[in-house]
Image (tube, rainbow, N blue to C red):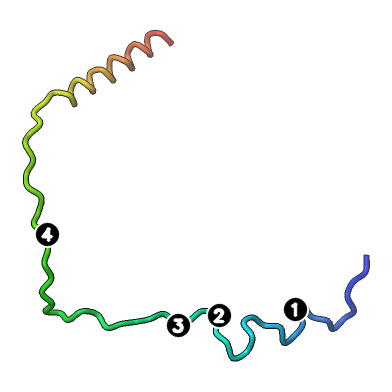
Amino acid sequence: MSYPPPGTAYPPPGTAYPPPGQEAYPPPAYSAPPPVGANYQQAPPPQDTQDRGGDGFWKGCCAAICCCCLLDMCF
């Protein structure tokens, strides 16, 4: 296996990116923040929805517990 001669560098000097005198990316466009007293309109809060009042949650819990018990008995 051959090695490069001593004193050689990689990358060779003078091959930096971007080329001198150019920028890699344009600078970001900054702007002033809005004034403190700005009058912004906020959306009204959502209206209360009707109470679902169903027992679906409890039916689901009972079904899950029954399923776990059946699986426990079978295995």
Q: Residue at label 1? A: 11
Q: Residue at label 2? A: 24
* Figure disc tally: 4
Q: Earlier in the sequence, mark 3 or mark 4?
A: 3
In contact (CB < 8 Å): disc 4 and disc 1:
no
- Foreground: disc 3 or disc 1: 3
Q: Residue at label 3? A: 27
What quarter of the picture does the N terminus occupy? bottom right
As shown in the figure, which amino acid type bears the numbered disc 3? Answer: Pro
What numbered label is drawn on residue 43? 4
Q: Position of residue 17 (x, y in %)?
A: 64, 80
Q: Secondary structure at mark 4?
A: loop
Q: Earlier in the sequence, mark 4 or mark 1?
A: 1
- Above-or-below relation of 64 to 14: above
Q: Secondary structure at mark 2?
A: loop
Q: Position of residue 3 (x, y in %)?
A: 90, 71
Relative horizontal placement of residue 64, taking residue 17 as reference (left or right): left
Q: Earlier in the sequence, mark 4 or mark 2?
A: 2
Label 3 and label 4: CA atoms lie apart by 35 Å
Q: Position of residue 6 (x, y in %)?
A: 88, 81
Q: Would you call the spot at circle 3 few (<14 residues within 10 Å), some (14-19), or many (20 or more)?
A: few
Label 3 and label 1: CA atoms lie apart by 27 Å
Kindly indicate the quadrant of the structure image that contains residue 29. bottom left
Q: Residue at x 37, y 9 (%)?
A: 73
Label 1 and label 2: CA atoms lie apart by 18 Å
